[in-house]
Image (cartoon, rainbow, N blue to C red):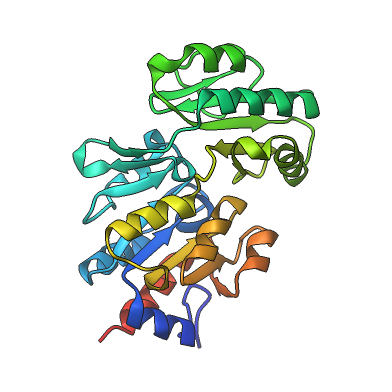
């Protein structure tokens, strides 16, 4: 009998074993357990995939500075896609930014004004390549001693010395997360890409055309890898485009209802090593 942490072999995993050249996985709620650690089983599966010649890309909404938990598990190419596709970082070269796809300050200002008018009480943070800067009423989800604290308009108008904007964050203390996302897209969607990955009403906003999927597609094209040769894993709305782009896409058992509705393949929850279970099946099917 197959245990809860094993992934039964399916036609999808058999096809993936024959064609997979790259595995793309989200981190929080997907590869990482709820305590934000990587299990020994997952560490072994990632290393085995790389040894078998399958590249692994971590594709996350996290900023580069929050990647220490998986830094030692970036094999081969050394790259990770962070900030929902806004940056590609080389951890074999000291965390150097090899690709930056910024949100222009003018567009970010237009978003702040439109969202603030439509959703009074919203507060904002500005994620730059150097770190995060936020408004006085923005919840300090993780404090940064080097952060500037000021109104968003000031942070966007005078912060060029901190590097380009890679993500704008918007938080609302009262609106439901999906309600806030729908409202913000309606009033400011022309200026950027809106998504979310938090259980709270915290929106993540990138430049037009910037997403996990579009940056992953660029990285794959540089390697001559087609979507059909990619297996992707995710759990939240910011993973939807990537899961739709990849030839084979798995939703975690714990995924957001929208992700479950958009995918046909499932794996075990992040707490049960669902990503590792599929990787093991793919490797088991290799000649």
| As drawn, 136 above or below 229 | above
Residue 159 horizontal side relative to residue 265, left or right: left
The quarter of the picture where the C terminus appears is: bottom left
Q: Position of residue 147 (x, y in %)?
A: 47, 17
Residue 201 horizontal side relative to residue 227, left or right: right
| As drawn, 85 above or below 168 | below
Residue in the picture at 23% in, 53% down? 77
Give the camera-side residue of 25 and 144. 25
Residue 174 horizontal side relative to residue 281, left or right: right
Give the camera-side residue of 218 and 31. 218
Instruction: Look at the image and tell me whether residue 125 can be seen.
Output: no
**Residue 123 placement: quadrant:** top right
How many badges with numbers are in the image? Answer: 0
Q: Position of residue 182 (x, y in %)?
A: 74, 44
Q: Position of residue 251 (x, y in %)?
A: 56, 66
Give the camera-side residue of 156 and 66. 156
Residue in the picture at 20% in, 39% down? 93
Q: Position of residue 64 (x, y in %)?
A: 38, 37
Instruction: Look at the image and tell me whether residue 263 can be seen.
Output: yes
């Amino acid at each position: 009998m197959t245990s809860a942490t094993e992934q039964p072999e399916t036609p999808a995993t058999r096809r993936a074993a024959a064609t997979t050249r790259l595995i793309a996985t989200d981190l929080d709620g997907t590869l990482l357990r709820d305590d934000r650690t990587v299990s020994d089983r997952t560490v072994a599966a990632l290393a085995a995939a790389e040894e078998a010649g399958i590249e692994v890309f971590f594709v996350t909404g996290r900023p580069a500075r929050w990647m220490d938990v998986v830094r030692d598990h970036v094999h081969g190419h050394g790259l990770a896609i962070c900030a929902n596709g806004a940056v590609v970082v080389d951890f074999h070269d000291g965390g150097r930014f090899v690709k930056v796809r910024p949100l222009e300050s003018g567009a970010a200002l237009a978003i702040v004004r439109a969202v603030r008018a439509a959703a009074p009480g919203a507060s904002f943070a500005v994620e730059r390549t150097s770190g995060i800067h936020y408004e006085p009423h923005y919840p300090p989800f993780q404090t940064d001693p080097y952060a500037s604290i000021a109104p968003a308009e000031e942070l966007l108008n005078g912060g060029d010395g901190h590097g380009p904007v890679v993500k704008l964050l918007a938080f609302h203390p009262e609106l439901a997360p999906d309600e806030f996302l729908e409202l913000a897209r309606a009033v400011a969607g022309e200026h950027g890409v809106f998504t979310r990955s938090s259980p709270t009403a915290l929106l993540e906003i990138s430049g037009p055309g910037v997403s996990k999927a579009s940056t992953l597609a660029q990285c794959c094209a540089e390697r001559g890898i087609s979507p059909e040769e990619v297996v992707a894993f995710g759990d939240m709305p910011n993973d939807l485009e990537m899961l739709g782009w990849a030839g084979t896409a798995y939703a975690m058992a714990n995924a957001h209802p929208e992700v479950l509705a958009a995918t046909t393949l499932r794996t075990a929850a992040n707490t049960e090593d669902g990503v590792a279970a599929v990787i093991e099946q793919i490797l088991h099917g290799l000649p």
